[in-house]
Every structure is written in structure tokens, then in C-alpha cells.
Amino acid sequence: MEVSQRELIARDGTRIGYQMRGADGPAIVFANGLGSSHIAYEPLIASLPGYRTLCWDYRGMFSSGQPAAEDANTVSHQVDDLLDLLAAEGIDEFVIVGWSMGVQVALEALHRVPRRARGAFLLNGTQGRLFRTLMGNAAVGMTMPFLLSLLHAQSRIANFVTRRIGRARSSVRSMQMFGILSGTVDRDRMHAVLTRFGDIDWKSYARLLHRLDEHETRDFLSSIDVPVAILAGGRDLFTPVAQSEELHHAIPGSYLSIIPGGTHYMPIEFPLVVGAQLRKWLDRIPGWEHGSSTARTAVAR
């Protein structure tokens, strides 16, 4: 079944592009990593027949428009957009899969609508305050505000350089050589992700990174009472295993799995492994068991 590209005008007038697959069945929402799109999730989505899947582009990224106000791009705004999309599609209850930035979006969704979000499957993420945890090194995080200000000021140059690098076939091999990607990565899919990344607006990207650094989840993690699975890459340079271990200890009853050869790009490196764990985890959620035909598409509250 093909993925259909759709569009919605959010509550504040921002145009949001999103992707749907399936007309019925239990709903699974995919929250992207920053700078990525549904392309990275396609193998996982394809492994979920019988489910209704939704993925969307964050405001200011890819098929979504820029918000009228520059500060209207917080993690909370992304969740507002998700809730608008669910209402438009008539989806009440859902489970959410979050990767990288999508982990913070997923956690915020659990906090905002705890009775509707029935579980979260979290990949390569952190609980917030991104710069504090980036690469497991506080010194790296301290330099990020300056670097982002520089990128914002020189966004035209950054856009040009990123576009050239993203379209170069050699970029994937270079990332493997420097340990950013594993040898198991799907090179064609990763190249497609990088090509799209080359088209981003660096001003929007820098603003979104700032918003991630402002986002904090520590205060409510202990109140989460739905199934949560956390997957970490043993070779993830950006969100090291320690960040996933912190999440695991903070969320009661959560499950932690470490993929030894995984980097920050596990959905593209180990789609079969991640997909198998996702289907196994879904069996813990009544109504979302793999192969369940139970539809959860009541009108959204």
C-alpha cells in the first residue's frame, strides 16, 4: 500500500505536510528526527501491514511551511500540529514511534494527552536539554549556541555547502569512515535522506535545535504509565547509550535494548532488527498486537 502525501492548515495557520498509509487499523504515529523525513521510516512502515500509520514534517521543514511567528516552533508546537493531524484524520488513540528529535516530541505527546497516547517506542533520543547531553560532552554543548548563531547568520553559505554534500554519493562512505554510520546502513536510503537534508533551510534548522535545547521532560517522566521501549545504538556518537539509560531509569517499567553496532541512524542501519522489536513491543499494547484488526479511529477529542 502506497504512502499518500497530504496537507493540513494548523490551528495557527501554518501549513503542515504529512504522510498517511492505510485507511483503518490501530494508529501508529512516526515522529521524525530533525532534518529527516518519512523516507527513513519507510522500511518500518512497510513492515506493519494492518496498521494505519502517520508521519509529518515539522513546521519549517520539507513539505511544511514556516510559522508566521519565528518562536512558534517549540516541541509543544510540534505536538499541537500532531493533535491537529489526528483530529483531521479522525484518530483518537495512538502509539508513537520517535527517533532522535522525535523522542522529545513523543515524550511531550505522552505528557499532553496521556489517555490517548497508548505507548512510545523511542530510538536514539534524550529526555531534553539537548546541548547539555549532546555527544555526552558538556563542552561540546557549550559551543552549540555560538555555532548555531553563526549558521543562522551564514545560512546561505550553509545551505549551499549542505546541498553539495548531501547530493554527493561519497558522503555516505565518508560518514561510515568517521564512525557516524555503521557498515550495515542502506546506502541508497541514506543517500536519499542526505539529499533531502541538503534542501533544508538552515535558519529553520538552527531555530529548531535551539527549541530542543529548551525542552525538558524530567519533571513528568516518572508519571508515564504506558508501555515504553527504548532502543539505543552502542556506537551512537550524538546521543550516547548513557542518555537512553537515563530515560530507562526515569520511566517506570520501560524496556531498554542496546543494538551494539548501531549508530544514531538505526532505522536505516538495522530496519529488520528495529522492526522485529517494534512488532514484539506492539504485542504488549491491547488493541495494537501485531496483526490486530481492531480499528481505533474514533473522532478525536
Image (cartoon, helix red, strand yellow):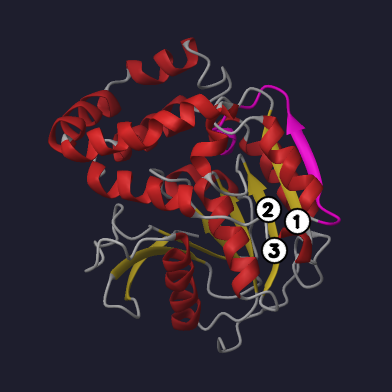
Residue 121: numbered disc: 2
- Circle 1: residue type: Val
Residue found 70% across the figure and 36% down from its top: 273
Q: Position of residue 183 (x, y in %)?
A: 56, 17
Residue found 13% across the figure and 36% down from its top: 156
- Circle 3: residue type: Phe
Q: Position of residue 112 (x, y in %)?
A: 60, 73
Q: Quadrant of residue 297?
A: bottom right
Of all residues, the one furthest to the left in this rendering is 156
Residue 271 drawn above or below residue 30 = above
Visible residue check, residue 201: no
Q: Position of residue 175 (x, y in %)?
A: 44, 18
Horizontal arrangement in the rendering, residue 81 relative to residue 45 (left or right): left
**Image marks 1 and 2: residues in contact by CB distance under 8 Å:** yes
- Circle 2: residue type: Phe
* Residue that mark 1 sits on: 228
Secondary structure of the residue carrying tag 2 is strand
Q: Quadrant of the C terminus?
A: bottom right
Of all residues, the one furthest to the top in this rendering is 177
- Which portion, as a residue range, is magenta? 252-267
Of the two numbered discs 3 and 2 in the rendering, the one whose residue sits closer to the viewer: 3
Q: Quadrant of residue 39?
A: top left
Residue 220: numbered disc: 3
Of all residues, the one furthest to the right in this rendering is 253
Q: How many marks?
A: 3
Label 3: few (<14), some or many (≥20) within 10 Å? Answer: some
